[in-house]
Image (spheres, helix red, strand yellow):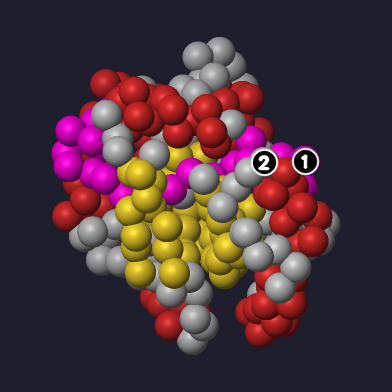
Amino acid sequence: MQDYHIHSDYSTDSEQKLLGICEKAVEQNLSEIAVTDHIDIDYPYDLHFAFDFDARSAEMDAVQKNFPSLAIKKGVEIGITAETKKDYVNIINAHPFDFVIASVHVLDGIDPYYPEFFVGKTKEQAYTAYLQAIDDGMRDFDDYDVIGHIGYASRFYPGENRQIHYADYADILDSILKRAVQSGKGIEVNTKGIETTGDTLPNESILKRYRELGGEILTLGSDAHSADRVGDAVWETAEKLKEMGFRYYTSFTRRKATQVKL
């Protein structure tokens, strides 16, 4: 089993050392992890997402020697906008990543993590704007492996019934999911949503639609920013995916996909 969304101290919103991440992954009986530290170009807050691939890669190679049963993949989570996606192509092409998550963290200059994003908007307006940002960011851009945590904004909605259900946003979700399927890309099943929304990101309704459209490329990730969260709910989520009819999760090495039986 995998955890393909983990942040270390190379992300400015984490202080977690790689060694602790790996120790927890082994404890969780994981066979592989992807360390997916942030690159968010033009992030509009005080956090400045610096990135040093060479330093991180050297550390990962050194730590890997101590964990022969655990494959440590060199990943990255890019925070795309319609304006910055061309810049990411240059970054991605310059480094031998194993795995790339493309996420949306900022729209109209605001991260939905902050309450100001929801001020003056209904839930429908906020979620539509968020999903439209994903759709715009993915248009004419395919230098990624999976779309990250579809539903991210719902984690922070300051009200009840937080989940983004397929039936309520069918047209725009179909645009996102069809583009992923048609371009041979996948989606991440992010377990961090469970604690705030009651389901993964994306939730069951969206995952079922992805499968109906022919989607098969899935990765599982905890979005851990500390070692104690590594592997959170990935085993349980894998069982749920099997119940939905999915047969595989996807492993990546140097951006090449391999399907692994759930």
Which badge, 2 or 1, is on the more N-terminal residue?
Answer: 2
Image location (x, y in percent) of residue 105: 54, 50
Part of the protein shown in magenta: 208-232
Name the disc covering residue 228, or none. Answer: 1
Q: Is residue 223 above or below residue 212?
A: below
Quarter of the image holding residue 212? top left
Q: Residues within 10 Å of mark 2 (few under 14, many from 20)?
A: some
Task: Single out the residue that lies furthest toward the top.
Answer: 160
Q: Is residue 91 visible?
A: yes
Q: 75 left or right of 17?
A: left
Q: Nearer the viewer, residue 2 or 201?
A: 2
Can I make out residue 10 in this image? Answer: no
Q: What's the residue at 26%, 21% (across, down)?
A: 167
Give the image location of residue 141, x and y in percent.
31, 66
Whole-percent x, y for residue 216 in the image: 26, 45
Residue at image location 30% in from the left, 66% down from the top: 142
Which residue is identified by label 2? 28
x, y (%) of residue 32? 56, 56
Q: Residue at position x 64%, y 36% from top?
A: 232
